[in-house]
Image (tube, rainbow, N blue to C red):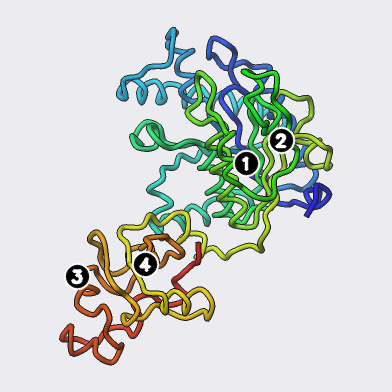
Amino acid sequence: MNRKAITKAKRIVIKIGTSNLTDKSYRLEPRKVEKLTKEIVELKKLGKEVIVVTSGAIGAGIGKLDLKQRPRDIKVLQATAAVGQSVLMSTYDSYFARFGQTIAQVLLTYGDFVNRQRYLNIRNTLLTLLKSGVIPIINENDTVAVDELKFGDNDNLSALVACNLGADLLILLSDIDGLYTYNPKRSAKAEFIPVVDDITDEIERIAETGGKTSVGGMKTKIQAAKVAMKAGIPMIIANGSDENILMQIIEAAPVGTLFIPKQERINDREHWILFSASPKGQIKVDAGAKTALVKQGGSLLPSGIVGVENEFICGDSVSIVDAKGVEFARGITNYSSSDIEKIKGAQSREIELLLGRKGYDAVVYRSNLVLV
């Protein structure tokens, strides 16, 4: 894959960072908002389906409440986000309306992706909006999502949205041109990296966090790239302040850092198992079981299980590890941790005798298993 392939992208998820929307005092800057809305509308005119994942609610709230700095108290931070979200959406709506474009507000939390039914509901709603010509404006629900505020970010949210919708391209707009060997704001030795086809340890090492109003820095952008690339979706990190940046990207101009996926797309269910369904526990298997899963495409049978960690129930997502404790697969278990303790090492035909009831022949069927 190369940049020319990007020109064919039909469904595009665009993440807009706080710095792309606000001034140095954290207030929304009309000029910046107008610039991006105009560029997004231009993409729509080309027949592209555009989904926006926006930051800026907390920044807008800081400006509206005339705060001098970002609050640290979680309750104040959530209240600030609540104030800012209305300001943010009102501003988006006013500028998109100038171009005759309808938008829709969609607030999500990580829990919406963990629950399979809600995950599918997200997809159905967003696809319906796109079919109607509406641009979804998505943000994390900062007001209620305590964990997301502490550990989450819109970089990873945008990657999950892109995978949920089977997007053709993910664009992360920031205040930096792309990935550098060092933080260009701190080091004169920084060299630009135009293309990444593998997230190596070195790439993760050079990813640094920065920014006063944003939760996520370059580190979270690399995390998002790993999710997108695993799903077969190319991703670009680019500077949102550059003129016509979106059109430059879609016309294959050499801007930003392009992350090229190595593999073909995984299907929707595989992606959900791998990235959205947080493992509730761990199943340790022997070498024979690992070979059957990795090289022979088999299901996980009780005979190959040597142990479990943590408590979980039937239908939970579990991490599957080898004898050294290294995760190599994830799946949806047919048995609880307590049941697996009773049947581990046994043949499938012995399950009914050991549990007093006939269950499934496999602990994790191949159709519910994804290699990491």
Of marks 2 and 1, which one's residue comes earlier in the chain? 2
- Amino acid under label 1? Ile
Q: CA distance from mark 4 to mark 2?
A: 50 Å
How many other residues sit within 10 Å of disc 2, few (<14), some (14-19) or many (≥20)? many
- Amino acid under label 2? Ile
Residue 266 lies, in percent from the top left, at 59, 64
Of marks 4 and 2, which one's residue comes earlier in the chain? 2
Badges 2 and 1: C-beta atoms under 8 Å apart?
yes
Tell me the mark number nearer the camera, choosing from 3 and 2: 3
Image height of 338 relative to 174, above or below: below
Q: CA distance from mark 2 to mark 1?
A: 9 Å
Judging by the rendered image, the residue that carries numbered circle 2 is 40
Query: Residue 135 — which label?
Result: 1
Residue 180 lies, in percent from the top left, at 68, 31
Query: Residue 203 versus residue 90: which sits nearer the camera?
Result: 203
Judging by the rendered image, the residue that carries numbered circle 4 is 323
Q: CA distance from mark 3 to mark 4?
A: 20 Å
Query: Residue 338 — which label?
Result: 3
* Residue under the point 51% across and 42% down: 157
